[in-house]
Image (tube, rainbow, N blue to C red):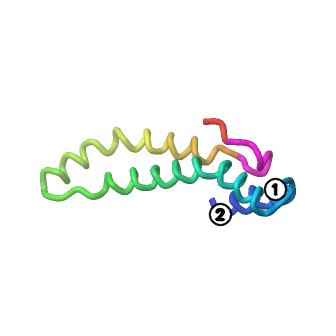
Amino acid sequence: MALEDALVLAACLATEPTPIAAFRRFESLRRKRVEEAVALGRQGGQQKKAQGWLALRLRDLMLPLFVPLGQKAQERMFRFRIDRDPLAQPVQ
């Protein structure tokens, strides 16, 4: 995400007339993607916090069903190529 941010920020600074306008555009371009990445990370971490023997057993039984879903979400997140057009919104 940091490398993507650097590319987008550089493009914004190159195309906008003032740094303030560049940072506003940068935030509008990046906020949604960063929030989605944070949410995806939290979602993946919460599945691993089972407490008690019953919760552990249920988690272990359900995990094979949910791992492919998480993998697809990650593939969608990382399919986006910022180097092709840094000023474009990612298509979901």
- Quadrant where the N terminus sits is bottom right
Nearest the viewer among 21 and 92 is 21
Q: In the rendered image, which residue does mark 2 sit on?
A: 2
> In this image, 75 relative to 68: left or right?
right
> In this image, 91 relative to 12: left or right?
left
Q: Answer whether residue 86 is magenta in the image.
A: yes
Amino acid on which the number 1 mark rests in the picture = Ala
- Quadrant where the C terminus sits is top right
Residue 78, horizontal then vertical, whole percent = 61, 48
Q: Residue at x 34, y 38 (%)?
A: 65
Quadrant of the rendered image containing residue 3: bottom right
> In this image, 61 relative to 39: left or right?
left
Q: In the rendered image, which residue does mark 1 sit on?
A: 11
Q: What element carries label 2?
A: helix
Nearest the viewer among 71 and 33 is 33
Q: Which is more foreground, mark 2 or mark 1?
A: 1
Q: What stretch is highlighted in magenta?
A: 81-89
